[in-house]
Image (cartoon, rainbow, N blue to C red):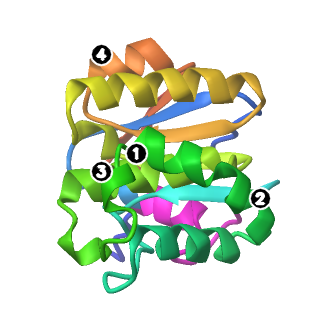
Amino acid sequence: GNSLAVNEVTLTVNEGEVFALLGPNGAGKTTTLRLLNGLINPDAGQITMKGQVGALIELGAGFNPILTAKENIYVSAAILGIPKREIDRKLTDIIEFAGVTDFLNTPIQSYSSGMKIRLGFSVAINLRPDIMLIDEVLAVGDIAFRNKCLQAIREIRESGVAFVFVSHSLGQIQMLCDRVLYLNKGRTDYLG
């Protein structure tokens, strides 16, 4: 038969909830995030998202390598429809959180993957979307930055932002997540 990457999966994520997608490699976790982000369209069924979506699905995805960090921050904001003056106000917070103050006018292509992730995460959380999709990005970067991200997630969820989180770190999931969906071969094994 026709094998689907994700099949007959039903889930609802509420405001302020941190929802984890778990499962072995090839279970359909990243595909589910890509469906939620509109990067791919479902062959059947429907996806309803209420609010603005921010996503960290691939390392530094969405960054133009030849533009500087500062230029990329403004481009990311423009894509999300965020006015320039709002970014003018948040720029310092974004670069300080990411720890790239000294590299603001450096092209992204010279950034390490860790720096790209830090900047991507910082842009995403400082622009405060309603729904945040995160795929394994907290697996990279030093422990101090990871802890800063986990603390930021805890604070942001208080304002009603919903998170859908893919991670292989059971520790992070236990610390952060309210509910989990365990996928296996594209189907729901467990939801609760």
Q: Residue at x 77, y 58 (%)?
A: 86
Give the Cα separation between the discs numbered 3 and 1.
Answer: 31 Å
Q: Which residues are magenta?
A: 31-48
| Viewer-closest of 8 and 89 | 89
Q: Which residue is mark 4?
A: 171
Helix, strand, or loop for circle 4? helix
Q: Residue at x 59, y 54 (%)?
A: 91
The disc label shown at residue 86, or none: 2
Question: Residue 157 vs residue 66: left or right?
Answer: right
Where, by quadrant of the figure, is residue 22 drawn?
top left
Q: Residue at x 35, y 65 (%)?
A: 60
Residue 132 in the magenta stretch? The answer is: no
Which of disc 1 and disc 3 is earlier in sequence?
3
Q: Amino acid at mark 1?
A: Ala
Foreground: disc 2 or disc 4 = 2
Helix, strand, or loop for circle 3? loop
